[in-house]
Amino acid sequence: MNTDRPATSSGTAVLGLTPLDPGVSARLRERGDAVVLPADSADLDAFLAARGDDVRALVCSGTVGAPAALLRRMPSLGAVVVFGAGVDAVDIQAADALGVQVSNTPDVLSEAVADTALYLHLETRRRFADARRLVADGEWARGTSPSLTDDAHGRRVGILGMGRIGEAVARRMAALGCEVHYCNRRPVEGSPHRYHADPMSLAGAVETLVVAVSGGPGTRGLVGAEVLERLGAEGVLINMARGSVVNEDALVRAVQEDRLGAVGLDVYEDEPHVPRALVESDRVVALPHVGSATTGTRRAMRDLVVENLERYLADGVLVTPVGMAGLAH
Ligand code: 8YV
């Protein structure tokens, strides 16, 4: 980290980039020293040209972040405060080189995101939404029988990335009587689950593969055509981490060619765009990135964002800083 830049630099403004959690935007707008502007807008461009020098802290979401070019337009910037656990939308390397600290909102969302993985696991196996539709459409009353589905309990489930969210997913799967396998940079000490050193080995050992690893350059395309092939035509892929971790073209091909049993997705490569082939396939359960979208979790994330911002502005320290080392897979 470049330490030339003083922790509390001379500018005064806070810049919030939308789309951003409405509660965070509202909290920023209440401040006398903050502006909230849409990312990639002419207004932002004009603001940065006139007042880019004043910005000390940037607040953004986990998906609309801060590329190097944006960071460079704010020479007094000392901190990027991210509303989300994933900071892959921020150019961490550029931030580090510029002496800009980055914070995220870890822990507070792990349980909600793991609930989403559990839902996708249940849904890809039990197809409750299809069954529900039979009732809602009156088909059941007209005599249509629900189809038989697959058991969700007792499966061999692989978790790619045994961080805080991965651990929370593992607990849920273990409660369903599933045999949990995982792949991580290194084995987790004391873990009762089966370790695999690489995604190929993990995919070959399980029936359902859950992607729970952080996004970013270190994990881009980690789940590619070969891993999907290894998972096999009966296998299920679940991703509620980052779209970039899965090669979406390879996923689309596997779905189109019936080379995967089912897919449960909450994240995509180019959100909010979901490839038609995925939307239209009966094998795919697709959610609109709602992993952490509960009132309580979002409130906790919001509080942590505000805490990070205030602490940074007061004494140049972030409460939940992200280290470079924590990012690579
Ligand atoms: C949020 C997320 O939906 O935490 C993350 O990394 O992707 C989600 O919790 C996102 O940050 C909202 O902007």
Image (tube, rainbow, N blue to C red):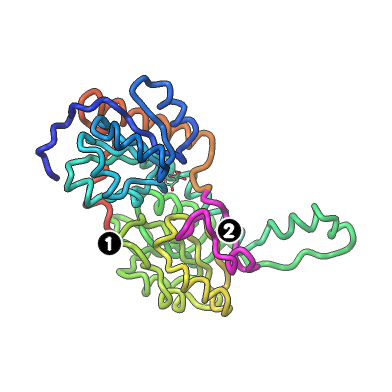
Q: Would residue 46 be found to the left or right of residue 109 on screen?
A: left
**Residue 185: mark in rendering:** 1
259 horizontally vs 188: left or right: right
Q: State which quarter of the image contains the N terminus.
A: top left
The three-letter code of the residue at mark 2 reads Ala
Nearest to the observer: residue 269 or residue 55 = 55
Which dot, 2 or 1, sits closer to the camera?
2
Rendered location of residue 195, percent (x, y): 34, 65
Residue 286 marker? 2
81 drawn magenta: no
Based on the displayed image, in which of its 4 quarters is residue 142 positioned?
bottom right
Q: Main secondary structure of the magenta part?
A: loop
Mark 1 belongs to which amino acid?
Arg
Q: Horizontal and vertical percent for residue 43?
A: 41, 37
Q: Which residue is painted at 48% across and 59% down in the image?
A: 268
Q: Position of residue 323 (x, y in %)?
A: 23, 46
Residue 280 colored magenta?
Answer: yes
CA distance separating discs 2 and 1: 28 Å
As drawn, 199 above or below 229: above
Q: Nearer the viewer, residue 223 or 47?
A: 47
Callout 2 environment at 10 Å: few (<14), some (14 to 19), or many (20+)?
many
Q: Residue furthest right?
A: 142
Look at 27% across and 26% down and name the residue there: 311
> Can the viewer see residue 231?
yes
**Start-end of magenta stretch:** 266-289
- Contact (CB < 8 A) between labels 2 and 1? no
Q: In the rendered image, which quarter contains the C terminus?
A: bottom left
